[in-house]
Each structure stands twice: as structure tokens, then as C-alpha cells.
């Protein structure tokens, strides 16, 4: 049974985002360009996010940053982890809207960006899950004393036993978690879109807060109540994300109108307007 569920877990983590991408591109009658831009956004955000987290760990270990009291460490480090992810990923999303995906100014195109962002995360994690499955399959009946240094044998034996003794339901939680995480990325892609369509930066703050809240809650819940309760809470998060997504839904513009540049209020096509007020100049800034 575990052979099947471990393999299925990684396979679903790959298949779910790809299936969503196929559905959205066909439903929106758009190509895969925005999906790939969303995926690149996630990768680029991690170029800063992962070294930043490593730096924080070093600073805490060397007491450059004061270590919180033991009782508060789960809360403090969960909050830091949640904020770190939000503060790298959401501004990256905003920057991509401004400088790369300048044509993504509709609800449907924002969905494709969000699907690529969350989908790339799921695909990379799914690849790691499948790689771990292959490694554990190879090590399951191997003579570890012949292939590992003596000091590592007991540690690896323990890891292999743990991997092959998990309840089958636990082995599928990775795919279920990714299924719940994708709505967060869809919702936040649409929240950040409002920075440009409504020209209000507070929507970026809303995306950062929601992302940080979800990540922090998940990290605290898994330490306090375990994986199953955490996934239940994340199901609620996914429902809320879908509600945010639906509340911001707008009809798609007619073909061709989407790609036309947004003009500051007061500057109409075909009319000369050489004197823009300071307010109009500020309105032309999107992020």
C-alpha cells in the first residue's frame, strides 16, 4: 500500500498544477506565457527568500539577534517564517505585474499568474517527493553498512524505518496540502492585481498579511496539534481564499482592449494634454 501512496503523493503534486494550467488556458483562451511567468516569479522570489532565511538562522545562532524565550520560540519563529515568505513572494508578484506581465490586467490573467506561481511551487516539491521515494525504495532492503560511513548508518536506518512505517493517509498529505495552497496563490495574485487596476497600494499589504497569516497559522498548528488538524485548518484557509477570489471577480475585457496601455485619468486618446496635475502623475504609478 505504501509503495502506491508514496508514489501517488508525488505524482499528484505534479499533476494537480498542470491540470489546473490546462483548464485555465483553455477556459480563458490564453496561452501558457502568463503561467510560466507566474512560475518564474516563484523561483525568483526564492532566490532572495532562501538565503534570507539562512542568514536569519545564522544571526540567531551567533546571538547577533536575541534568541526569544523558550516558551515563545514556536510563536516567534512561526511568525518570522510566515512574514519572510510573504515579504519576498508578494512584492515579487507586484514587480512582475509592473515590469514583466504588463498585459495582465484582468481577473482571468491574474488567475494564470497565480496558477503558475503556486503550480511551480507544487511541481518543485513534487519532484523532491518523488526523488525521496526513489531513494527510500533503493535503501529499503539495502545493506547500509556497505554504502554509508559507519557514523551515518543508524541515522539513515531510522529515517528509512520512519518513511516505510507511516500511516498511508499521512503519505498523501503532501498532495492535499498543495491542493489547498494553490487557492492562496490564486487569491493573492488577484489581490495584488488590484494595486494596478484600482491604483491603491494597500492591496499589496492585504496580500502580504493574508499570506503571512496563513503560513504562520500552519506552522503553529502543526507543532501544537499535528498534521491532520493542520490540514483541516488549511482547508478553511483554502475556502476563505476562494471566497476572496470570487469577491474580486470581474468580467474579462473584449479582445484587444486588454493589451491597450492604461492612461492616467485626464489623458484621453486623440487629445493633447501637456499639463498633468501632480495628482494625475501620482495616479500613473502602479506599485
Image (cartoon, helix red, strand yellow):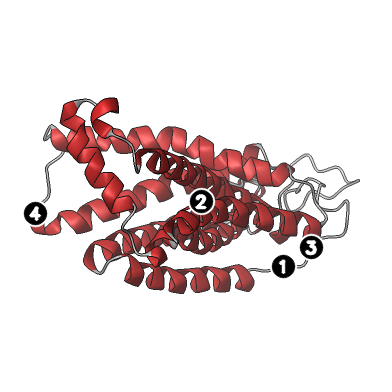
In the rendered image, the vertical position of residue 229 relative to residue 15, given as above or below: below
Whether 208 is drawn above or below 135: the answer is below
- Helix, strand or loop at mark 2: helix
Could you tell me if the residues under marks 1 and 3 are in contact, i.e. CB atoms within 8 Å?
yes
Query: How dense is the environment of label 1, judged by Cα within 10 Å: few (below 14), some, or many (20 and up)?
Result: few
Q: Is residue 66 above or below residue 279?
A: above
Residue at the image point whose x is 33% and y is 65% from the top:
227
Does dot 1 land on a helix, a strand or a loop?
A: loop
- To which residue does mark 3 refer? 252
What separation in Å lies between label 1 and label 3 (alpha carbons)? 6 Å
Where is residue 202 drawn, in percent x and y?
Answer: 50, 58
Cα separation between marks 2 and 1: 35 Å
- CA distance for labels 4 and 1: 48 Å
Give 159 or 30, whichever is nearer the viewer: 159
Please give the label number shown on residue 10.
2
Mark 2 vs mark 4: in front = 2
Q: Nearer the viewer, mark 2 or mark 1?
A: 2
Mark 4 or 1, closer to the camera: 4
Foreground mark, 2 or 3, reads 2
Q: Earlier in the sequence, mark 3 or mark 4?
A: 4
Label pair 2/3, CB-CB below 8 angstroms:
no
Question: Circle 1 is placed at which residue position?
Answer: 250
Amino acid at each position: 500500500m505504501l509503495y502506491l501512496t508514496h508514489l501517488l503523493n508525488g505524482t499528484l503534486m505534479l499533476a494537480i498544477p498542470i491540470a489546473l494550467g490546462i483548464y485555465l488556458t483553455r477556459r480563458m483562451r490564453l496561452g501558457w506565457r502568463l503561467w510560466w511567468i507566474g512560475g518564474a516569479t516563484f523561483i525568483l522570489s526564492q532566490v532572495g527568500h532562501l538565503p534570507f532565511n539562512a542568514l536569519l538562522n545564522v544571526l540567531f545562532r551567533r546571538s547577533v539577534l536575541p534568541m526569544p524565550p523558550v516558551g515563545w520560540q514556536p510563536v516567534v519563529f512561526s511568525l518570522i517564517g510566515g512574514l519572510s515568505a510573504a515579504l519576498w513572494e508578494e512584492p515579487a508578484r507586484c514587480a512582475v505585474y509592473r515590469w514583466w506581465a504588463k498585459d495582465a490586467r484582468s481577473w482571468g490573467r491574474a488567475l494564470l499568474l497565480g496558477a503558475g506561481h503556486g503550480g511551480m511551487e507544487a511541481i518543485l516539491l513534487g519532484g523532491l517527493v518523488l526523488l525521496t521515494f526513489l531513494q527510500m525504495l533503493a535503501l529499503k532492503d539495502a545493506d547500509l553498512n556497505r554504502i554509508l560511513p559507519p557514523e551515518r548508518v543508524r541515522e539513515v536506518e531510522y529515517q528509512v524505518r520512519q518513511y516505510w512505517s507511516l500511516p498511508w493517509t499521512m503519505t498523501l498529505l503532501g498532495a492535499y496540502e498543495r491542493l489547498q495552497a494553490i487557492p492562496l496563490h490564486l487569491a493573492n495574485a488577484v489581490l495584488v492585481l488590484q494595486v494596478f487596476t484600482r491604483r491603491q497600494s494597500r492591496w499589496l499589504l492585504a496580500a502580504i498579511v493574508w499570506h503571512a497569516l496563513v503560513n504562520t497559522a500552519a506552522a503553529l498548528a502543526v507543532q501544537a496539534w499535528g498534521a491532520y488538524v493542520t490540514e483541516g485548518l488549511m482547508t478553511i484557509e483554502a475556502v476563505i481564499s476562494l471566497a476572496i477570489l470570487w469577491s474580486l471577480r470581474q468580467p474579462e475585457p473584449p479582445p484587444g482592449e486588454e493589451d491597450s496601455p492604461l492612461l492616467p485619468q485626464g489623458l484621453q486618446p486623440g487629445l493633447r494634454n501637456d499639463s498633468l496635475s501632480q495628482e494625475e502623475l501620482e495616479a500613473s504609478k502602479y506599485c
